[in-house]
Image (cartoon, rainbow, N blue to C red):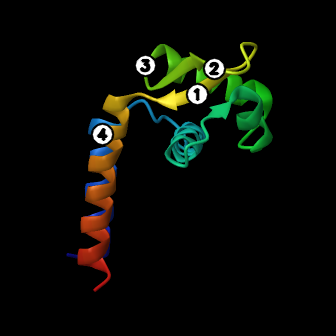
Amino acid sequence: MKLFTGLRQIREFERRQLPFLKSVIDFDIVIEIGYAEEEGQPLTLKQLFLLNISSRTTVRRKLARLIEEGIVARRKHTSDHRASLLTISASTVKLLGKYCGTVTYVSACCFK
């Protein structure tokens, strides 16, 4: 497979299957929340801000939209009731797994 054919396939998957990731910042927010959850340490809102993905206002606005769309979920922190933990919905994790498989397949074909 040629390089740009593969990249085109990846973008097509993103447009069809990941319309909720409207910007790089959206993608970064989802990745950081998912990574922290995968490591067993879900992020709080404050921890997300401290990652300096973008300005606090932008992160807050984009996170609110991701929560509203059901991509990110907030749940109460068990030991600190003032804070809430951010997690990625199960359906989004499944979809991002397919995305990862597509990227892996395309990169294996393009970069032999």
Q: Residue 70: which numbered mark, if any?
A: 3
Picture quadrant of residue 102: bottom left
Q: Is residue 59 above or below residue 6?
A: above
Q: Is residue 101 above or below residue 50?
A: below
**Disc 4 designates what residue?**
95
- Label 4 sits on a secondary structure element that is helix
The tag earlier along the polypeptide, 3 or 4, is 3
- Label 3 sits on a secondary structure element that is loop
Residue 66 vs residue 48, the one in the foreground = 48
Q: Residues within 10 Å of mark 1 (few under 14, many from 20)?
A: many
Q: Residues within 10 Å of mark 2 (few under 14, many from 20)?
A: few
Disc 1 to disc 2, how far (Cα)?
A: 13 Å
The tag earlier along the polypeptide, 2 or 4, is 2
- Label 1 sits on a secondary structure element that is strand
Q: Is residue 95 left or right of residue 48?
A: left
The residue furthest bottom is: 112
Q: Residues within 10 Å of mark 3 (few under 14, many from 20)?
A: some
**Disc 1 designates what residue?**
86
Nearer to us: label 1 or label 2:
2
Is there a contact, CB below 8 Å, between mark 1 and mark 2? no
Disc 3 to disc 1, how far (Cα)?
A: 12 Å
Picture coordinates of residue 93, whole percent (x, y): 36, 38
Q: In the image, what residue type sits under mark 1?
A: Leu
